[in-house]
Image (spheres, rainbow, N blue to C red):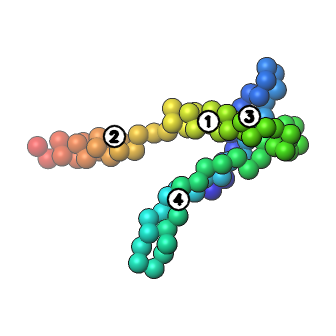
Amino acid sequence: MNDKHEIELFKGVTCEVITYYQPKEDKTYDYPGCDEEFYIEQVLVNGEDITECLTAEFVESLLDDIKAGIQDSEPDYEAMAEDRAYSRRSRYE
C-alpha cells in the first residue's frame, strides 16, 4: 500500500514523500507469511524525484518523522471498539 506525505524539507521547501507499507502477515499452513515493511519509495520536490540526491541517513530521518506523525494521528481502534461495546451493553442494562 502506498501513501503520500507532505513534509517541509527546509524552510519554505516542501516535498511529497511516497512510502510503501506492508503489514506483517502471520505464517499459516500454506502461506509462509511476511514481515512488516515500511520504507520510502520516492521523495518529490515540484514533481521531480530527488531520492537519489539524499543520504541514507536523511531518508531514514524522514521516515522516522513520518512514523512519528502517523503514530500521533492514528486512531485508537481498540479503544473505539471498547466504547462501542460499552455503548451496546449500556442500552440493555
Q: CA distance from mark 1 to mark 4?
A: 19 Å
Q: Which residue corresponds to the image point at 58% horizontal and 57% vertical from the top-left?
A: 22
Q: Which residue is mark 4?
A: 35
Residue 65: x %, y % from top left: 63, 32
Of the numbered discs 3 and 4, the one sitting upstream in the chain is: 4
Disc 2: CA contacts within 10 A as few (<14), some (14-19) or many (>=20) = few
What SS does tag 4 mark? loop
Q: Is residue 27 above or below residue 86?
A: below
Can residue 73 be seen here?
A: no
Of the numbered discs 1 and 4, the one sitting upstream in the chain is: 4
Q: Quadrant of residue 49?
A: top right
Q: CA distance from mark 1 to mark 3?
A: 10 Å
Residue 3: x %, y % from top left: 66, 48
Disc 1: CA contacts within 10 A as few (<14), some (14-19) or many (>=20) = few
What SS does tag 2 mark? helix
Q: Which residue is mark 3?
A: 58
Marks 1/3 in contact by CB < 8 Å: the verdict is no
The amino acid on which the numbered mark 2 sits, given as a three-letter code, is Ala
The amino acid on which the numbered mark 4 sits, given as a three-letter code, is Asp
